[in-house]
Amino acid sequence: MSDPMIDEAMIRTLLKEQLPHLADLPLERFQGGWDNQMWRLGDELAVRFPMTPRAPLLLEQEHRWLPVLAPRLPLPVPAPVRLGEPTGAFPKPWLVTSWVPGSPADSAPVEDGPRSAAALAAFLTALHREAPADAPRNPHRSMPIHQHPDMDLHSGGFLSAEQIPALQAIWDDAVAAEPWHRPPVWIHADLHPANVLTAGGTLAGVIDFGDMCAADPAADLCAAWMLLPENAIAAFLDAHPLADAATVRRARGWALMRAFGLMQVGRAGELGQTGGKPTWTAGGRATIDRLLAGR
């Protein structure tokens, strides 16, 4: 069975059936997202629809766990309002959340390094607390970095011959670093530029918590190289209490792995392939440049 067409008429039908008090609010498609398609609903809400096989579970996890975490987080996040029921019109769960204002950092990158480093450090310090035993695990992000397959830095033709040896050294060092031996902490797990919002050049919000899980905090600390100007990375790491030397080494490996993911999605977008995001390429290349500058 093919996925149903998601358009304004279908969304209004769902709202009239399940949330009639919201059915007449203005609707506007938000350009972005990977697992979910998002529409702005009025001035204060958003509605998200799963578009990939794994997306329904991610929405359900966000609906279950984000209300537990959100009250302690110092940046705006999309508070879940209602998990919509599957129907004949749309046979999957869908989610209404609060709207978080700002522009995605893949189109409006961070410019104010000091303020953004402080904001990111405060956000992750608040998030990175020991997770309960029933917290979700993620098959990719909860896996220790030394258990991931070795990276083929020649694949995709993303790197120059001059870059590869230094980046291979960063990867090898990350894999060799002492593993995280403490209890797993809550992580966002997907802090790439399209999931972070900026305003006035500064971090202004974090969205898309569907991948949140219990894991090594290094899988989030990689955001320093993915989001912040080079001259702000050290300040961020100094401000985060879990950024010991081994965790930073692992985080650099995560940043390299995530940079390749961004460039792959960006390449797909440049080729016009389904799911591709051409705006993601720049974030991947900037991450590589920051890793090389700090080696």
Image: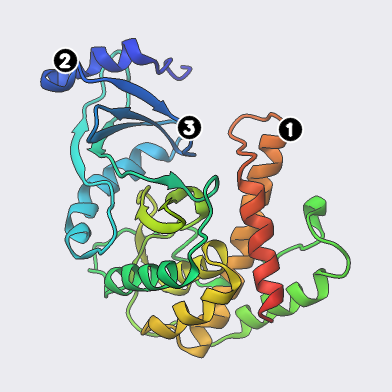
Residue under the image location 52 percent in, 60 percent down: 111
Is residue 56 or residue 161 the one in the foreground? 161
Residue under the image location 61 percent in, 54 percent down: 283
Q: Do the residues labelled 1 and 2 touch (CB within 8 Å)?
A: no
Local crowd size for mark 2, using a 10 Å CA cut-off: few (<14), some (14–19), many (≥20): few
Q: Which of marks 1 and 3 is in front?
A: 3
Which residue is identified by label 3?
31
- Residue 5 lies in quadrant: top left
* Secondary structure type for disc 1: loop
Image coordinates of residue 107 in percent, x first then y, are 54, 45
Image coordinates of residue 67 in percent, x first then y, are 18, 53
Q: Which mark is residue 17?
A: 2
The amino acid type found where label 2 is placed reads Glu
| Residue, far right | 161
Q: Do the residues labelled 1 and 3 touch (CB within 8 Å)?
A: no
Image coordinates of residue 27 in percent, x first then y, are 31, 21
Please tell me which of labels 2 and 3 falls first in the chain.
2
Local crowd size for mark 1, using a 10 Å CA cut-off: few (<14), some (14–19), many (≥20): few
The amino acid type found where label 3 is placed reads Gln
Residue under the image location 17 percent in, 60 percent down: 71
Please tell me which of labels 1 and 2 falls first in the chain.
2
Q: Do the residues labelled 2 and 3 touch (CB within 8 Å)?
A: no
Would residue 126 be found to the left or right of residue 225 on screen?
left
Q: Residue 271 carries which label?
A: 1
Local crowd size for mark 3, using a 10 Å CA cut-off: few (<14), some (14–19), many (≥20): few
* Secondary structure type for disc 2: helix
Q: Which of marks 1 and 2 is in front?
A: 1
The answer to whether any part of residue 58 appears in the image is yes
The amino acid type found where label 1 is placed reads Leu
Would residue 98 be found to the left or right of residue 205 on screen?
left
